[in-house]
Image: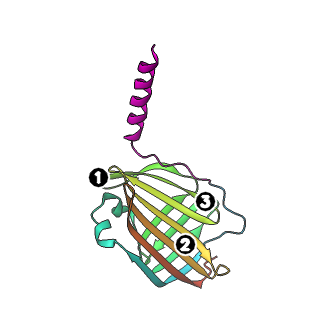
Amino acid sequence: MTRSLVAILAAALLLAGCGSAQVLLSKPAKVPAGTDFSGNWVLTGSSGTGQREARELLVYVFLETGKSLKITQTDSGLFLSFDRSVVEEFRFGENDSISVGAISATRVSGWEGTAYVVETLDEQGAKLIDAYQLKNDNRQFQRTIEIWKKNEKILALVQEFSQVSSGK
């Protein structure tokens, strides 16, 4: 092969890679020592931008919210109950396909330091990032929600919860 043919093939492969679909990377399943989200929490504050535009994206159907939050943490995952009705289950270190009706997505979850992070990627390439973390000596619980469309942050929301009881 001539050098120019090799250069053309290399450029073609590089360009093909640029158009490939986004892939979510697996996250660690090991719970950081002393980290337990279990308890009953009540929303005390919320701030954010972009909710109207985010509602138009498919990935938005995977976003659950509520004013009260009951969390049960086991050795292998979290169960979150929003307003005593909607229950969301996350398995530590999951990397799986999920669906709500006809809408499918890929989900990965796991630990980034002491934060539990869930990433959901829909078929159109929009991504929901949901991060949970204890604050203020474990007396407050913070949830950070972002929705991305391509390289643009469409939704940014921070929710603060105070503990009602430990639930342990």
Does any portion of residue 67 appear in the rendered image? no
Q: Amino acid at mark 3?
A: Trp
Seen from this angle, which residue lies furthest top? 1
Cα separation between marks 2 and 3: 16 Å
Q: Residue at x 30, y 60 (%)?
A: 57
Q: Position of residue 125 (x, y in %)?
A: 36, 51
Confirm or deny contact between disc 1 and disc 2 (CB under 8 A): no
Report how far apart the C-alphas of labels 1 and 2 lie in the structure. 28 Å
**CB-based contact (under 8 Å), mark 2 and mark 3:** no
Task: Compute the Cα span from label 3 to label 1.
Answer: 29 Å
| SS assignment at label 2 | strand
- Residue 80 highlighted magenta (yes or no): no
The quadrant of the picture occupied by the N terminus is top left
Q: Earlier in the sequence, mark 2 or mark 3?
A: 2
Quadrant location of residue 111?
A: bottom right
* Left or right for 95, reference 148: right
Q: Residue 87: give x, y in percent of width and height.
A: 45, 68
Q: Which residues are magenta?
A: 1-28
Left/right placement of residue 101 relative to residue 146 reads left
